Amino acid sequence: MNLSLRRQHGLHPGQFFGIGMSVGVVVGLVLGTLLALRLGEDAYEVVKYLIDRLAGRRDRVNFELLLQ
């Protein structure tokens, strides 16, 4: 009987997971927003450059110039 009363008033393991996920999402969103505001446009340009470089869209050989 004591166990059933404890289960009614306590949190279930699935609720711990849901609360943890919710807190993690909110904290991550807040920290990401603060970091983006702090770093600003320069950080955006650096990330964009790195993505373009990794995707092979920058620093490629211009083969038309080699044909001349």
Image: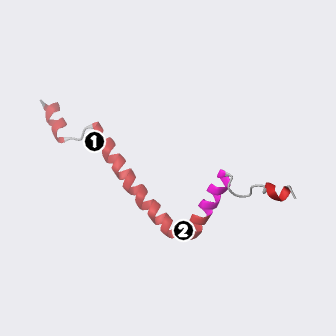
Q: Name the residue carrying label 1.
A: 15
Relative horizontal placement of residue 2, taking residue 17 as reference (left or right): left
Which residue type carries mark 1?
Answer: Gln
Disc 2 or 1, which lies upstream in sequence? 1
Between residue 46 and residue 8, name the one nearer to us. Answer: 46
Q: Is residue 1 above or below residue 28?
A: above
Q: Marks 2/1: CA distance?
A: 36 Å
Mark 2 neighbour class, 10 Å CA radius: few under 14, some 14 to 19, many 20 or more: few
Residue at point 64%, 56% (across, down) = 52
Q: Quadrant of the N terminus?
A: top left
Q: Is residue 35 above or below residue 11?
A: below
Q: Quadrant of the C terminus?
A: bottom right
Relative horizontal placement of residue 20, taking residue 1 as reference (left or right): right
Which quadrant of the view contains residue 27? bottom left
Q: Is residue 1 above or below residue 44?
A: above
The question of residue 38 being in magenta is answered with: no
Relative horizontal placement of residue 7, taking residue 43 as reference (left or right): left
Q: Name the residue carrying label 2.
A: 39
